[in-house]
Image (cartoon, helix red, strand yellow):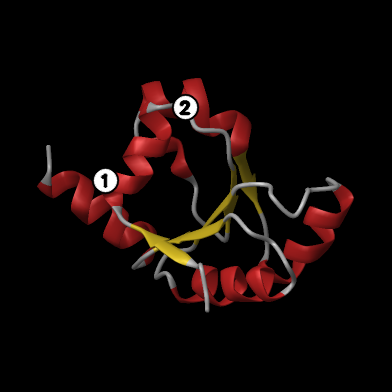
Amino acid sequence: MSSLMGLGFFQFDNLLKNRVPFALLSYGVDFVGFDQGIFQKHLEKNLVLLEPKETFSYIETQKFAKEQSMVLVCSSGEVSEKFAKKLEASGYKNVFFVSGGYKKLIEEKNNNL
């Protein structure tokens, strides 16, 4: 059974507000405009811009534990979900992806302001 979980705006926002430690692996998404305060306080130090093919080499280079919390995001959600599944299949336990990608995240954020 898969434990893979997609996150929407409320879950993502909750992680940020509660300063939950996680690595944010981003495939072509720059969060600078997401929320300046949150970006500077929490996201900036956790954000890693990667090409999808660099995912496993980055994780190995950084020596991530299998329990390391990771949130993957791309523009549409498709690439991040695909790589989240690959990471989970490789034994990583706390892997999440942004459902619908950054576009959906921003849409949900704007609808809840």
Mark 1 lies on residue? 10
Q: Residue at position x 57%, y 33% from top?
A: 21
Residue 20 image offset from top left, x and y in percent: 50, 32
Mark 1 surroundings within 10 Å by alpha-carbon count, few (fewer than 14), some (14 through 19), many (20 or more): few
Residue placed most toward the observer, 46 or 96? 96
**Badge 2 is on which residue?**
19
x, y percent for residue 100: 34, 68
Left or right position of 112 against 68: left
- Write down the quadrant of residue 98 in the picture: bottom left
Residue 18 as seen in the image, left or right of residue 61: left
Res 48 label:
none
Q: CA distance from mark 1 to mark 2?
A: 14 Å
Residue 81: x and y in percent read 50, 72
Can residue 5 be seen in this snapshot? yes
Q: Callout 2 environment at 10 Å: few (<14), some (14 to 19), or many (20+)? A: few
Where is residue 10? Give x, y as percent.
26, 45
Reading the chain from its start, which is encountered first: label 1 or label 2? Answer: 1
Q: Is residue 17 above or below residue 97?
A: above
